[in-house]
Amino acid sequence: PGAGGQPQPEAGLECSSTEEPGGRGGRRLRTAFSAEQISTLESSFQRQQYLGAAERRKLAGRMRLSEVQIKTWFQNRRMKLKRQL
């Protein structure tokens, strides 16, 4: 009973952790950007390919996205440009 009861609370903790998207070790779902968001991101990228923390915060607030989503989009966009060249 002692060894059998130990894994259950651990499993229960993992299942109930809804604070972290995807759970422990899981991947986030892909963000589906709207056409308007993509347009705004592309125009920002045309002005400057690297955003500072202040610009990223401002853009994230305006677009209602997280700073991490903005940062990741810019990283992916720079890689896309690099592949095209």
Image: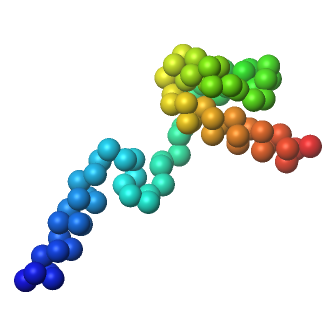
| Quarter that holds the N terminus | bottom left
Q: Which residue is found at the position 83% from the left and 40% from the top?
A: 81
In this image, 51 relative to 33: left or right? right
Question: Residue 48 sits in which quadrant?
Answer: top right
Quadrant for residue 41, please give it.
top right
Residue at position x 24%, y 66% in the image: 11
Residue 65 appears in the rendering: yes
Q: Is residue 48 left or right of residue 38?
A: right
- Residue 73, by quadrant, is top right
Image spot of residue 6 (x, y percent): 17, 74
Q: Residue 43: x, y in percent?
A: 74, 20
Name of the residue lying farthest toward the left: 1
Of residue 3 and residue 28, the one placed in the foreground of this image is: 3
Relative to residue 11, is residue 26 drawn left or right? right
Q: Looking at the picture, does residue 22 appear above or below residue 72?
A: below
Mark yes or no: residue 59 visible. Answer: no
Instruction: Judge whether 43 appears above or below 82 on screen.
Output: above
Q: Tell which of 38 and 14 is nearer to you.
A: 14
Identify the residue shown where x is 40% and y is 52%.
22
**Residue pictured at 12% horizontal, 76% vertical:** 5
Q: Is residue 77 above or below residue 63?
A: below
Residue 56 locus on image (x, y percent) = 62, 24
Image quadrant holding the C terminus, namely: top right
